[in-house]
Amino acid sequence: MRILLVEDEPDLARQLKGALADAGYVVDHAPDGEEAEFLGETEPYDAVVLDLGLPKIDGVTVLERWRKAGLATPVLILTARGGWSDKVSGFDAGADDYLTKPFHTEELLARLRALLRRAAGHSQPQLTCGDLRLDPRAAKASVDGEPLRLTSLEYRLLHYLMMHQDRVISRTELVEHLYDQDFDRDSNTIEVFVGRVRKKIGSDRIETVRGLGYRLIAVGTAA
Ligand code: CA
């Protein structure tokens, strides 16, 4: 899952970027409204964390422009304490959730998990596919109760496939959702990572749909 973090305070941005990476997300950071607007319109994020008080273009305006342009990505806004009118204008501009500063990082992560879950049409906090299970709270996965040892990229790959197990996922889509904007993207490397994940979860669990991409197959039953 790939997140856009829009925050102009360098310390907070650094801290949040670290926490999001530790939680298994790949993160792009925009320090002002102009870059945020551009990235949001050009890169396919799974969710956005958007501070409202920003240099160049304020957060509410950025959000209004995104929604006007048809962007449906879930957006969590960060508002200043006591700024109830910010919350109202944020929701009216198309925000899905909010947090008031200062907040606990754990709460931000929990709200993000809920947003991502709802956006993908899941109601359960844990994702399952047959006896394959993934818990976004712990950033851990298991097969038939056996914990899997996954690298962060393998985890992101499996997380994305499990979030969207109802459809075939193209290699391009995987590249766009697993790497940040600075990564030298090569869709061939995806094949390598799919191969590694297959080795760990069982090769019959990820089907290659020729010319289209990959699909997760349910094997076994949920414990
Ligand atoms: Ca700010």
Image (cartoon, grey):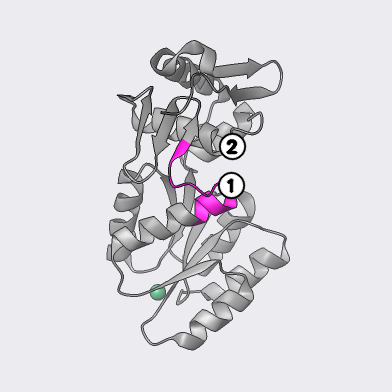
Kind of residue at badge 1: Ala
Label 2 CB sits under 8 Å from any ligand 1 atom? no
Relative image position of residue 159 (x, y in whole percent): 46, 36
Q: Quadrant of ligand 1?
A: bottom left
Q: Are marks 1 and 2 in contact (CB under 8 Å)?
A: yes
**CA separation in Å, label 1 and label 2:** 7 Å
Image-based side of 165 in relation to 76, left or right: right
Give the magenta range: 115-127
Q: Residue at x 41, y 44 (%)?
A: 25
Q: Secondary structure at mark 2?
A: loop
The residue that label 2 is drawn on is: 164
Q: Position of residue 184 (x, y in %)?
A: 48, 32
Along the line of sight, the residue nearer the viewer: 98 or 128: 128
Residue 29 in sight: no
Question: Which SS class for mark 1?
Answer: loop
Identify whether 163 is placed above or below 5. Answer: above
Disc 2 crowd, CA 10 A, few/some/many (<14, 14-19, 20+): some
Q: Which mark is residue 120?
A: 1
Asked if the stretch drawn in magenta spans residue 182, the answer is no
Q: How far across and how far down the image is residue 73, in percent? A: 60, 56
Is residue 69 something that shows in the picture?
yes
Residue type beneath disc 2: His
Give me the residue at 37% from left, 31% from top.
141
**In the rendered image, the vertical position of residue 62 relative to residue 45, given as above or below:** below
- Report the label total: 2
- Mark toward the start of the polypeptide (1 vs 2): 1
Q: Residue at x 48, y 46 (%)?
A: 124
Q: Please name whichever residue, 160 or 219, is drawn nearer the observer in this view of the structure.
A: 219
